[in-house]
């Protein structure tokens, strides 16, 4: 099956006709250029087949070898988060019409899927204050990279400025996206764990396409952004923010910072950590940039009888328009993950989301206070933190995490490989799922290690 179309297997006559067309007498001859040492001769050495009952037992034994969050308490964040998922999310996303739905190429035949995407887009716009959102992208990293490419296209400039307080994995993806397009990526230095705005004025110039910031930043710090947009706009550059969607229930929206494009990781909205994926990148922008938004945008309309309907309004990708006019080669959207985010946001509502954000803020503050009171531990940075905070350690971060695992605790991210100037340091994450008992157990384990 390809592109939603079904194909019948080839007949022997058709197979021979195809071989004759390429000048081969057999299928084996097609592989003559492969070295004999790497070619399989004979049968695969596979175990005998299992009955359904035996297979379930075997798979259960394999799954039991994994550690999971029902047995281990996790304080690891850095882009993928352990948030509570209401049962209604899995009940709806598990329905066959959503769970097995294929890409809606024939839009008029996929009204349910299109409406779910439209509702997701509408919720993202309400959350960010932006006027348009797409049907989602792969993850927060690629969403930010696509925003940088879009900003270069809008401004017709080739230089992108990104703060070192942006997730280092995101910056690696940015570098990959930009260098193949012969675009320049310049990093802004840090000052006490946040963007060094004293350097921004001199680093912005008339060839800068965009200023890329993260809110809260990678260290969980809520950055001051009141002047960021004005500084960028004074040089004709766009302000692009990567924002934690949960934090937006408490913080000002990116629109209130006068941001032009907003992206972020939406995994925390009803999607489980799942060993790091699949993830969900959201992308929203001002209406004037709508034709530079990559991927799909679903719109609302009415049919000839005046009935409400949904259509793929824009599809700025190479599968739908001329390759040279394509905005991006982004292949698809994370429809099932986006649906989970929409169900989560609808189920939680403004008050529920605000409560989750408040619990993250309070519990992280409690954990930070307890940990940094231990001998040998110290806060890496001051400021207001949301959900995550960096701590200086009295020893190696990798050895600490091995020690914590022995206590059924998944520790934080070892920061030394990404920010060697900090020395031994760790980024801890505390969400609403962590109890006081779990936080106190972490503190007790740290005290025993130090």
Image (cartoon, rainbow, N blue to C red):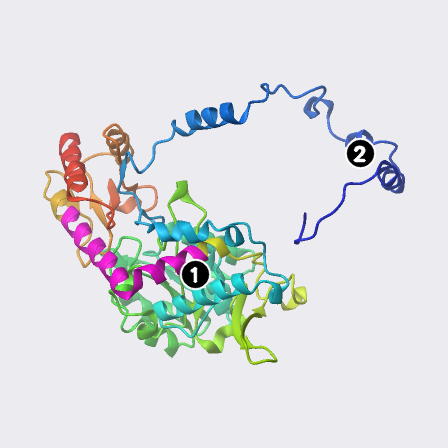
Q: Is residue 110 left or right of residue 21?
A: left
Magenta stretch bounds: 339-368
Q: Secondary structure at mark 2?
A: helix
Q: Quadrant of residue 315?
A: bottom right
Residue 43 appears at what percent x and percent y? 69, 20
10 and 265: which one is in front? 10
Q: Is residue 79 left or right of residue 405?
A: right
Q: Which residue is mark 2?
A: 30
Q: Secondary structure at mark 1?
A: strand
Residue shown at 42% from the left, 73% from the top: 237
300 and 160: which one is in front? 300
Q: Quadrant of residue 261?
A: bottom left
Residue 450 appears at what percent x and percent y? 15, 32
Q: Is residue 326 left or right of residue 430?
A: right
Look at the image and tell me whether residue 118 can be seen.
yes
Q: Main secondary structure of the magenta part?
A: helix
Residue 112, compared with residue 228, is above or below; it is: above
Residue shown at 36% from the left, 48% from the top: 80
Q: Which residue is mark 1?
A: 282
Residue 383 appears at what percent x and percent y? 18, 58
Residue 143 appears at what percent x and percent y? 46, 59
Is tag 1's residue or tag 2's residue first in the polypeptide sequence? 2
* In this rendering, the label closer to the viewer, 1 or 2: 1
């Amino acid at each position: 099956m390809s592109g939603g179309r079904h194909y019948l297997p080839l007949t022997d006559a058709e197979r021979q006709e195809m071989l004759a067309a390429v000048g081969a007498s057999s299928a084996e001859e097609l592989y003559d250029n492969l070295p004999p040492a790497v070619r399989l001769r004979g049968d695969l050495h596979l175990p005998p087949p299992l009955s359904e009952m035996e297979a379930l037992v075997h798979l259960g034994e394999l799954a039991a070898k994994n550690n999971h969050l029902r047995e281990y308490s996790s304080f690891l964040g850095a882009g993928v988060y352990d948030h509570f998922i209401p049962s209604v999310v899995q009940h709806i996303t598990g329905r066959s019409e959503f769970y097995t739905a294929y890409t809606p190429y024939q839009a008029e035949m996929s009204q349910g899927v299109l409406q779910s995407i439209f509702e997701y887009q509408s919720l993202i716009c309400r959350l960010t204050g932006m006027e348009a959102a797409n049907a989602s992208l792969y993850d927060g990293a690629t969403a930010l990279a696509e925003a940088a490419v879009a900003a270069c296209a809008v401004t017709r400039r080739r230089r992108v400025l990104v703060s070192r307080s942006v997730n280092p994995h995101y910056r690696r993806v940015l570098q990959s996206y930009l260098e193949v397009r012969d675009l320049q990526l310049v990093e802004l230095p840090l000052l006490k764990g946040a963007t060094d705005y004293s350097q921004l004025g001199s680093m912005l110039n008339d060839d800068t396409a965009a200023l890329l910031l993260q809110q809260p930043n990678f260290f969980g710090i809520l950055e001051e952004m009141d002047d960021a947009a004005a500084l960028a706009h004074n040089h004709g550059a766009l302000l692009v923010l990567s924002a934690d969607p949960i934090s937006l229930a408490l913080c000002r929206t990116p629109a209130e910072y006068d941001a032009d494009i907003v992206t972020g990781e939406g995994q925390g909205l009803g999607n489980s950590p799942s060993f790091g994926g699949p993830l969900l990148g959201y992308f929203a922008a001002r209406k004037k940039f709508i034709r530079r938004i990559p991927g799909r945008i679903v719109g609302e309309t009415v049919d000839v009888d005046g009935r409400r309907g949904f259509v793929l309004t824009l599809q700025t990708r190479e599968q739908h328009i001329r390759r040279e006019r394509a905005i991006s080669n982004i292949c698809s959207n994370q429809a099932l993950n986006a649906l989970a985010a929409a169900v989560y946001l609808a189920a939680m509502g403004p008050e529920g989301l605000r409560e989750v954000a408040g619990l993250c803020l309070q519990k992280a503050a409690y954990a930070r206070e307890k940990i940094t009171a231990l001998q040998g531990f110290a806060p890496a940075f001051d400021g207001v933190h949301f959900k995550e905070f960096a701590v200086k350690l009295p020893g190696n971060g990798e050895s600490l995490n091995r020690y914590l695992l022995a206590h059924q605790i998944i520790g934080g991210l070892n920061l030394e490989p990404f920010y060697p100037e900090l020395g031994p340091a760790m980024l801890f994450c505390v969400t609403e799922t962590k109890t006081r008992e779990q936080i106190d157990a972490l503190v007790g384990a740290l005290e025993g290690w130090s």
